[in-house]
Image (cartoon, rainbow, N blue to C red):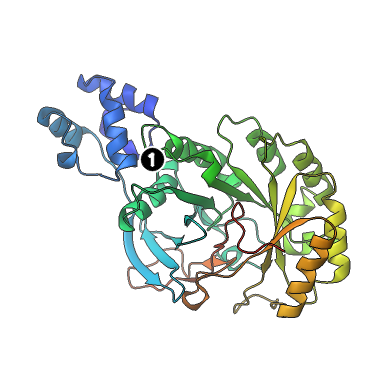
Amino acid sequence: MTSSTCDLAELELKELESALAPLGIEPYRAKQIYSWVHGRAVNEWEHMTDLPKKYRKSLAEAFTISTPRVVQRTLSGDGTMKFLFELTDCRRIEAVYIPDSPAHTFCISTQVGCAMQCTFCLTAKMGLERHLTAGEIAAQVRLLRSELKLLEQPVNVVLMGMGEPLHNYEATMRALRIMTSAHGAALSPRRITLSTVGILPALTRLASEPIMPNLAISLHGTTEEQRSSLLPVNRRYPLAELLATCRAFPLKRRSRITFEYVLIRDFNDSPADARRLARLLVGLRAKVNVIPLNSAPGIPYERPSSAKIDRFGRLLAEHRVTVSIRKSRGRDIRAACGQLVLEGTQPSPSQQLAGLMDTGVPSTPTSEL
């Protein structure tokens, strides 16, 4: 990597130290720069006042700090806020801010589109346009912290917006290292949740990472046939193998795996489904996040009745499963649970974004049964 092409938003701290060397800038200055960019969300060199002016000039000439542009933000009646970001190549992604959940929570994306083809998700209709870079993933957090004036407050981050994080493994892990760096945003891994459909080679690899986020597995079915009809990835990585991998996953003390279960009317919401789900999880340090489907045009499924949602949750609880039923947030601005879609591969600034995003926080359930 050369200084003439270096984007500092993409660098880890050690890489930044090395990138400064050709300019004759001391390695310790990297910590100062990292703090400005990732800790205080500053991307203009003239504002980095603890750097000598001669360094600021050299840095401005040699490096860029790419930052997505906030195109729009939409406020829900319940306080949820949806952000539309435009990337440097004019592609767009969304992130969602959920206040009081019980802390401040950001739902962020890891890809433009998604390749997983889940049948209940509008994002699947896009296909995968491209992976986000580590800098683009981490930038969503620094932009949200800055826009919402939350730079001095702890936040939760959930990687469950557009895309499958483990399909973009290298960039996702690099972004986690950037976000958790003590000299940057210094986010605690305990406040970060990674949601995945279960790409088993990547999930096995994740088990050996030094930075371990909370893990949320998209389950959604209690038989191989049922899950395969919702998540085509199950044909390659079957439910039985996924659960075996989860049983072997090294969990920290007091940690549990969250299993996300989108509840669909007359498909996977029966008492038999609840009992099968409870049996599947026997012996696992687990909790279940029941997510009543938010119906949307283009999705061939419907939301269960409130009575069926309540019955499903209570049956799980009766079988000693820790369960939460997610309260949808931001439904009035299409920022609720499960789907996000961009219409067109190269959206113009005037193009509208329609979608629904997963806005629950597996590590902080909204209601216990």
In x, y percent, where is residue 5? 29, 34
Residue at far left of view: 53
- Looking at the rendering, in which quadrant would you find the C terminus? bottom right
Of 264 and 154, which appears nearest the observer? 154
| Residue at image point 32% right, 34% down | 34
| Residue at image point 70% right, 34% down | 250
For label 1, the crowd category at 10 Å Cα-Cα, with few meaning under 14, some 14 to 19 and many 20 or more, is: many
Of 21 and 183, which appears nearest the observer? 183
Image side of residue 67 versus residue 369, left or right? left
Image side of residue 128 versus residue 133, left or right? right
Image side of residue 301 versus residue 97, left or right? right
* Tag count: 1
In this rendering, the answer to whether 56 lies above or below 225 is above
Q: In this rendering, does residue 329 appear at all?
A: yes
Of 179 and 169, which appears nearest the observer? 179
In this rendering, the answer to whether 70 lies above or below 31 is below
Q: For mark 1, give the secondary structure.
A: loop
In x, y percent, where is residue 267? 80, 72
| Residue at image point 21% right, 22% down | 23
- Tell me the residue that label 1 is attached to: 185
Q: In this rendering, does residue 88 appear at all?
A: no
- Looking at the rendering, in which quadrant would you find the N terminus? top left
**Residue type of the residue flagged with mark 1:** Ala
Image side of residue 45 versus residue 320, left or right? left
In x, y percent, where is residue 260? 69, 57
